[in-house]
Image (spheres, rainbow, N blue to C red):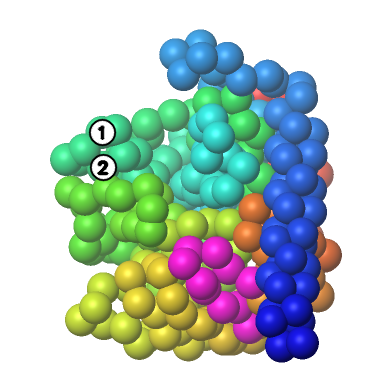
Amino acid sequence: MVKKRTLLMRTGLVAGMVLVAQAALAQDSALTSAAPRGSWATAPRHSAGIAPDPAQLIDLAIVQVYAAPTYGWRGFFAVHPWIIYKRSGDAAYTRFDVVGWRAPQVVQRNYALPDGLWYGSVPELLVDHRGAEAQSMIDDIEAAVASYPYADQYRSYPGPNSNTFLAHIGRQVPALKLDLPANAIGKDYRPLTNPVGVSSTGTGLQIGLLGLLGVSVGVQEGLEFNVLGLNFGIDINAPALRLPFWGRLGLKDATTPSPAASPDHALADH
């Protein structure tokens, strides 16, 4: 009887994972239907039209974080994030992300367009700060970029990778309020010498082992478990399930600007 129950539990778990994977595949297809992926060299990388026009908002400081499904089959499992910002007075954005094939200099400045498709994948806006709040955190963001401890290392699984990089910035700049999705594989990467610390939101607590096992808890991220790089949990702040493949299932948890910092023409096409 015990063996039968164990078999049923395993079968149920596998079936659940298959359903989640199918849902993720459907979501990925919907996101990229307007811009089908070609080969690595020909995949679209044009602007998604999401970022505000920096020239029109030259007097407004802006900080944004994006994430898009990674290229090819990895896009069914993980996302690639990046951060952009401009100070008040700047007419252009600065972008930072980690790009593995640029090793040994994996931290890249202005590698691609601020809101460009990631090799055919449409990005999702995760964080949007504007005005004085954004201006005040840019120096800290630049300091976090400079202090990233794995600037010459890259490993897609379990890290350090592009998600490890953004998680580092989130820890160093809590005002960013960055809550990376559950399918940001690598965000929980922690070295053996530092298994306990602040979570990637900069406000929660995390215990982790090389991004393979761990748990995070906090007001912003809720409760999330990491098992072999697959994350499961529940978000109470913006009610949702945190799931591998899918990221989150429920209300969105994007940080958006206040009306006072977001003029009517802030999202002008460009």
Residue 230 magenta: yes
Residue 183 is labelled as: none
Kind of residue at badge 1? Arg
Magenta stretch holds residue 249: no
Closer-to-camera residue (217/210): 210
Residue 190 image position (x, y, % from top left): 33, 73
Q: Secondary structure at mark 2?
A: loop
**Badge 2, how many Cα within 10 Å: few under 14, some, many 20+?**
many
Which residue is at the front of the view, 49 or 250? Answer: 250
For the residue labelled by badge 1, is the local secondary structure a helix, a strand or a loop? helix
User: Which residue appears farthest toward the front when viewing the image?
Assistant: 1
Reply above or below: 249 against 175: above
What span is colored magenta in the figure? 223-232
Amino acid type of the residue tagged 2 in the rendering: Val
Compared to 4, does 160 lie above or below? above
Indicate the quadrant containing the N terminus: top left, top right, bottom left or bottom right. bottom right
* Residue 32 horizontal/vertical position (percent): 71, 29
Q: Badge 1 local density, few (<14 within 10 Å), some, or many (20+)?
A: few
Q: Determine whether 94 is above or below 37 in the image.
A: below
Image point 46% across, 19% down: which residue? 40
Query: Which residue is located at x 79 percent, y 39 percent?
Result: 26
Q: Is residue 121 left or right of residue 173?
A: right
Q: Is residue 235 visible?
A: no
> Does residue 70 appear to the left or right of 155 in the view shown?
right
The answer to which quarter of the image holds residue 224 is bottom right
Distance between mark 2 and mark 1 Cα atoms: 5 Å
Predominant SS of the magenta segment: strand
**Residue hosting label 1:** 102
Q: Which residue is mark 2?
A: 106
Which residue is rendered at x = 21% and y = 63% of the image?
Answer: 149
